Amino acid sequence: MDQQAQQAARGWARLSEDAALRSRWGERVRTLNAALNALIQFDPESREQQWQRPAGDLEHASPPSRLTGLPFVVKDNIAVADYGLTCGSNLLRHLQSPYTATAVARLQRAGSRVVGKANLDEFGMGSSSQHSAFGGVVNPWDAGVVAGGSSGGSAVAVAAGMVPFALGSDTGGSVRQPASFCGVYGLKPTYGAVSRFGLVAYASSLDVIGIVADGAELARAVFEVMRGVDEWDQSSIEVAPDDARAGGSDATPDAAPTVGIPRSALSDLDPAVAEALALCESRLQEIGCKTVNVELATLEYVAPAYYVIATAEASANLARFDGIRYGNRSSQVAGAAEELVLGSRSAGFGQEVKTRILVGTYVLRAGFQEQYYQRAQRIRTLVRRDVDRALERCQLLLLPTYPVPPFKVGGGGLDEFQQKQVDAYTCVANLSGHPALAFPVTISDGLPIGMQLMAPPFAEDRLFSIAGRLERKWPVQRAPGALTMDDLVPAEG
């Protein structure tokens, strides 16, 4: 971590040492959350013993851990023992998790403290965090625009200064898009770099546990603790830090990689987003990077292929929530098992979830698999090859995170179908499995606009290094009214 990041981490770590400071922080977080609705649960006091965890319990952490004492919240589709696991759904409103996800457990062993669960679009399905049974999430920059989704609660908690970092899930941009809408950093790791054990599955071949953080170096520190193979997740992969795929010489702080921009594929950008892209390119050049034009011819097919695959996998994964094995059982239903399942799912699932399950079931029907699902899988292969081919000409790819600025609650001109169509810039990393990092670039009309960098598999260090250099030269502006540790320290005299 650089000096500024270390100073911020020390400020947060003071919570472990000062009960009065923790009390003031808790009060402020509750006040903020009453307005922003970012957290479904926040109850650090009921777990007071976690702040005094003995040093011997920090097994596997590098002493002293860079994350010791830092509080964080977890998106409520990731398991944390004794916390709820609602997935933002009425169907699981009363479910308590009996175990903890591997990624969360590793952070706890490193000395970080889980203090709450973050709000989200139900089962991670949405681009606005308005599809939650617990109410919509409010953007701290402007209450009239969405926070992004589906990890909107995690992004808002960080942007509002409630916690320095949070965990989310990214299936098609669900960490990066809300991070950009809220002016913070959002990492979608390489598929397999972080264990998915404990993440409630939406689309298993696309889902990853991601990170939202208030700085690039903090995101790096969190990722380094979370990454690695896990016996409970057979898709997880161990990659040594000095492996050539993990960044090599291009990941060093002084490196100036070539950055590719697929200009011909970036159509229909809002003028504010186009200006932010040009500004980001000039800043990259200013820190020594070379920019080149690359081709991503398959980008126009990304969104339809993604939604076919994602809905198909969702229809299978969510079949378990039937009111018998999992989920609240409808009290209005008696009789055959089919009636019980129909009643429980009809009452428990929201409209967006029902829509995606129906679409997924349709594309998997006999006679339709070849026409839709198998064709989408072939397109996915072409997308991955297209990205790899582009990365042969450069070390990083630069794309907008979203083609429009944060849009207004209720759509602001983008209906639900249009919101899905413009997910292509984020979905490409999920289809290909590559890592991507969203980072703030500028403020336009009072709202943050971010970009994202993509890298080869397991080259997350390249992303952190370049984003960190940009952050040090052009510091990130905080959301209005964001909480800082300095706000909680009584004035002397």
Image: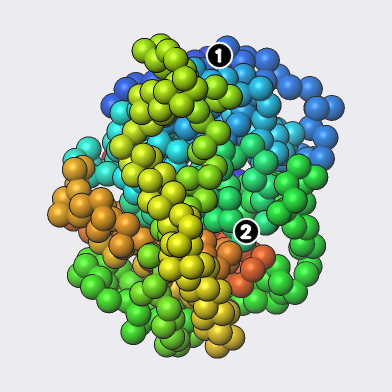
Q: Is residue 234 left or right of residue 310?
A: right
Q: Mark 1: give few (<14), some (14-19) or many (20+) Cα within 10 Å.
A: some
Where does the image place residue 236, in percent across and percent down from the top left?
72, 53
Rendered view: 198 above or below 98: below
| Percent coordinates x, y for residue 272 in the rendering | 22, 66
Is residue 218 in sight in this rendering? no
Q: Residue 83 appears at what percent x and percent y?
A: 57, 21
Describe residue 8's horizontal placement relative to residue 64 as left or right. left
Q: Which residue is mark 1?
A: 45
Is residue 314 something that shows in the picture? yes
Residue matched to label 2? 191
Figure quadrant of residue 248 = bottom right
Give the mark count. 2
Left or right, residue 459 beside residue 326: right
Q: Amino acid at mark 1?
A: Glu
Mark 1: secondary structure: helix
Say which quarter of the image contains residue 205: bottom right
Quarter of image, res 66: top right
Q: Residue at x 43, y 57 (%)?
A: 363
At a point 32% along the width and 76% down the height, the residue shown is 266
N-terminal of the pair, mark 2 or mark 1, is: 1
